Image (spheres, rainbow, N blue to C red):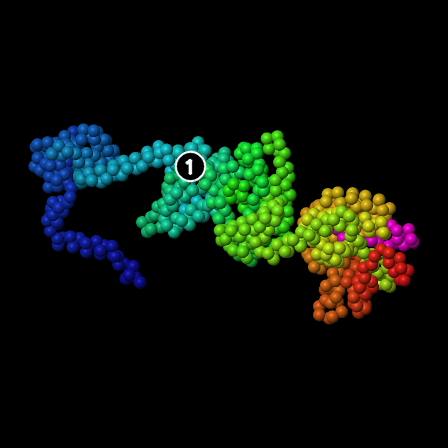
Amino acid sequence: MNDQASSPGFLPVLRKRRESAWNRIDSERVLQVLVRNLEGMVFRCAIDDHWTMHFVSDGSRELTGYCPDELEYNKLVSYEAITHPEDRLPVRRRIVEAMNGVARYRVQYRLLHRDGGERWVLERGAIVLDEQGRRVLEGFVEDITDQVLSQRQLSDAEQRYRSIFEDSVVGMFQTSIDGRYIAANRALAQLYGYAGAAELIAGLSDIAGDLYVEPGRRAEFETLMREHGRVSDFESEVYRRDGSRIWISEHAHVVRGPAGEPLYYEGTVEDITAQYHYRQQLEYQATHDPLTGLPNRNLLQDRLQQVVRLANRRGSKGSLAFVDVDNFKLVNDSLGHGAGDKLLVEVARRLKSCLRDSDTVARYGGDEFVLILGDYDGLAETLNILHRIQDAIAEPITLDGQEVRVNCSIGVSIFPDDGVDLDVLLRHADAAMHHAKKLGKGQFQFYTETLNVEARERLALDSALRRAIEEEALSVVYQPKVNARGRACGFEALVRWECAEFGSVSPVRFIPLAEENGLIGQLTWFVLRQACHQAAGWRAAGHPDLRIAVNISPSLFREKDLAALVGAVLEEAGLPAANLELEITEGMLMGDVQRSLAVLGELKAMGVDIAVDDFGTGYSSLAYLKRFPIDILKVDRSFVLECDSGNGGLAITRAIVSLAHSLNLRVVAEGVEQQTQFAVLNALGCQEFQGYYFARPMPAGQVAAYLAGT
């Protein structure tokens, strides 16, 4: 340990070895070779007015054009004299600073070459003492002309780019990869409504969210950049600072680093709002009828393809209707072309008013129009639209002070049944339309005869139902509801229709028809009035506790004055509200909840009981049962029929009854047909029962006998 501590150490040994190696080398020769071969000039000079050179290396020839003998001791020229006049004072000032400081200096200046040119040089030196102890300069001067010129060219190029960037009338930008502006010129700031570039960069910190009108547009820009490294004619609608909108076209590319990594995006922006709107106008003119503004036959093909593709995805159908205005030529010839044009404009307006937003009406030419009806849910919906069109077109129109009435003939083809190609569907619809004209105009015909038969039958049924309601040719029957002891506690009013043309028509057939054609309101009021008057008669006959139940349709439930109408019927019949039950379905409550609450609240305030019919087949939500003022829950017959079969129906029925009891609701089981069902439901706690096991619906004249026997 002690021997190691007294060791002279590593550095003295290393220094000794280096000195020994230097001593073995001809140092004078090495220095001469280095000085002679350096690309530049080694020098020693006096610190005087002429920078008198005591020594210069052979590099002076290349650097200055003068030999060492010509420069040393100013034999031909002084170093001060070949220093550029504009640089002499800055050079001397820099050396003086070194003399007063660290004694080392570095200075860049110009030399006047012997050939008359200029050389940029870099001088690096130090203030040292010579052999006599005088302060002199020793250093090295190298030619940096190429570097200086390259830097100047680069600087000039940058300056020119900066000038182009700042003064360009085209918006220019640089944005980060993550969507922030790094740089922008004045033109872009003005385009977007900002006072300057700094304000734009601060105001649009999130390009994706703050600039583009269409969500996801910036993501599309970035996807193109990743895939192709550039975008061209990237058109977008953007927000200006004041919230107004303009259309722009962007051209941009990715700027990459040495390793190919993306650094930022740069590009240009042009305002193309005027061009865009002009192009839109041209496109509109090419695809729309100038008189009516409707799509023309050029756009019809595209619209049909869209609807057909949608129908294929959904597995549904659609229809194409060819509409021809009857007697248009007569109007045109008698009142003139101006009146004819006005008629076509009005027909176009009426056709549009009859269709849904998803449908298309186009002017095919002359007085012919084509309708594309998507989402074909069945014959009934299409017929309703065709009826609306016929009624709308048949309304009188005043042309030049004269009232005119016209009709239209319509031919209909169904896709994909009758084809999927526009030409095929048009040809079939046109054939059907001409067939309609032959039958007497003002009619519609389907291309397929089967549909024509169905349409005619439905039209006939519709007409018969309208007459039956107007003439009160329908009848009301009453099905008893009994308590657990089998005694009648009320009746449900049910409508029946015996038609001379169609015989006994099932409610399953004519009630949906009444909903579709808007007759359900009249039908419901007919049943309500009949039922209330009948119940008032039972009270007068000594049955004051009997209640009458009437179904309310969904469309009627949405009437804002439903409670007032019900009150008027009760007052007219002289029936207390407590004797009336109104039955609604689950789905009727699930639309406008606030509206449903208000309607039910008004009815409850009158004293009417509210029953939910067919419970368990719709939403079956405990939340709405708790929220709405409901009195009665009717278990759907599908559960009642299975309650004694032991296959799960009993469990569902038990759950419904238990739920109703927990909410203090009266439970009615409908559709009871077997004694075993009655026994099970009675045991579960149902309070009222209804079904063929007790009695079938009966005319009002049989109710008295039934009550006497129970």
Please name the residue shown 63% across and 41% down the image: 394
Residue 551: percent from the left, percent from the top? 76, 53
Give the image quarter of residue 673: bottom right
> Is 538 covered by the magenta stretch?
yes
**Can the viewer see residue 317 in this picture?**
yes
Quadrant in the picture for the N terminus: bottom left
Q: Residues within 10 Å of mark 1 (few under 14, many from 20)?
A: few
Q: Given the image, on which type of amino acid does mark 1 rest?
A: Gln
Please name the residue shown 78% across and 43% down the image: 564
Q: Eyeballing the image, is 170 above or below 28?
A: above
Please name the residue shown 50% across and 47% down the image: 300
Q: Eyeballing the image, is 620 above or below 135?
A: below
Image-based side of 489 in relation to 145, left or right: right
Please name the residue shown 51% across and 48% down the image: 303
Q: Secondary structure at mark 1?
A: helix
Image-based side of 664 in relation to 429, left or right: right
Quadrant in the picture for the C terminus: bottom right
> Is 443 covered by the magenta stretch?
no
Residue 137: percent from the left, percent from the top? 17, 37
Residue 603: percent from the left, percent from the top? 78, 47
Image-based side of 389 in relation to 92, left or right: right
Q: Which residues are magenta?
A: 536-554
Residue wearing tag 1: 275
